[in-house]
Amino acid sequence: MLGIRWIPSFLIVWILLLSLSGGTIVAGRAGIGNFEFSLNGYTLTGTLTNGTITHDGHVAMQMSVDQTIPISDGSILVTATGVWSGTTNFAIITGSIANVKGNIYACISGQCKNGNYTGSGSWVGTFKWNKTQGSVASGTFQGELNILNAPPAQSAPFPVTGNWTTTFST
């Protein structure tokens, strides 16, 4: 008799835990991906990490850029971090890019200058199922950068567009 009561109690607790876990991550491992965009004729790439999807369709990823661009008279180091968040119906994905903070460090002909910038934007894409990788998502993004301490003063945000791709492994 005691064993019969234990099984239904266990099942009830298990069902409650499953039904209340609307924020549980669908992907078993955080995904990784990349994005690229052009800036003054140079192609820059960044990474998308810690990609998560919840059962209720919330998506989030961390972005980072750390790239040195060699130029004829020197080099330019571009760094940035930010957050991509959004929603999905598991076919289409859409969201915003926020908290972008970055730095440009340029050394040209022995003269070095440092500039900070902030940014924001939006992104869209689609999901496809891949047997070996799980959910593969890709699309486009657009945004704008605000250079904080550049001479001369910036009169308008600098537009940026590009492509992105990532996986959400199961």
Image (cartoon, helix red, strand yellow):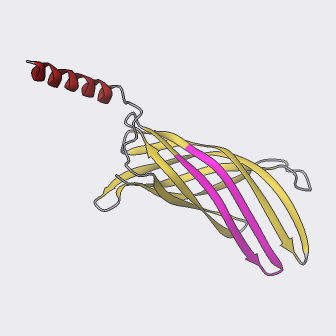
Q: Residue at x 46, y 50 (%)?
A: 125
| Residue under the point 34% across and 52% down | 170
In the image, residue 156 lies at what x, y percent?
Answer: 80, 47
Query: Which quadrant: the N terminus?
Result: top left
Judge whether residue 16 is colored magenta.
no
Question: In the figure, 17 relative to 164: above or below?
Answer: above
Q: Would residue 37 be found to the left or right of residue 52 on screen? A: right
Identity of the residue drawn at 34% across and 54% down = 128
Let me know if residue 109 appears in the view.
yes
Res 130 → quadrant: bottom left
Position of 73 compared to 86: left or right? right
Majority secondary structure of the magenta segment? strand
Image label count:
0
Q: Position of residue 160 (x, y in %)?
A: 66, 55
Give whichever of 51, 98 is nearer the camera.
Answer: 51
Residue 165 visible in the current orientation: no
Quarter of the image for residue 24 reads top left
Which residue appears farthest toward the left when viewing the image?
1
Residue 110 pos. (x, y %) = 91, 77
First to last magenta residue range: 61-84
Q: Nearer the viewer, residue 39 or 88?
A: 88
Q: Is residue 104 left or right of residue 132?
A: right
Q: Was residue 64 drawn as part of the magenta stretch in this picture? A: yes
Q: Residue furthest bottom?
A: 72
Horizontally, residue 135 falls left or right of residue 40, namely left
Residue 99: x, y in percent?
A: 67, 43
Location of residue 14 by image quarter: top left
**Residue at the image point whose x is 38% and y is 47% from the top:** 27
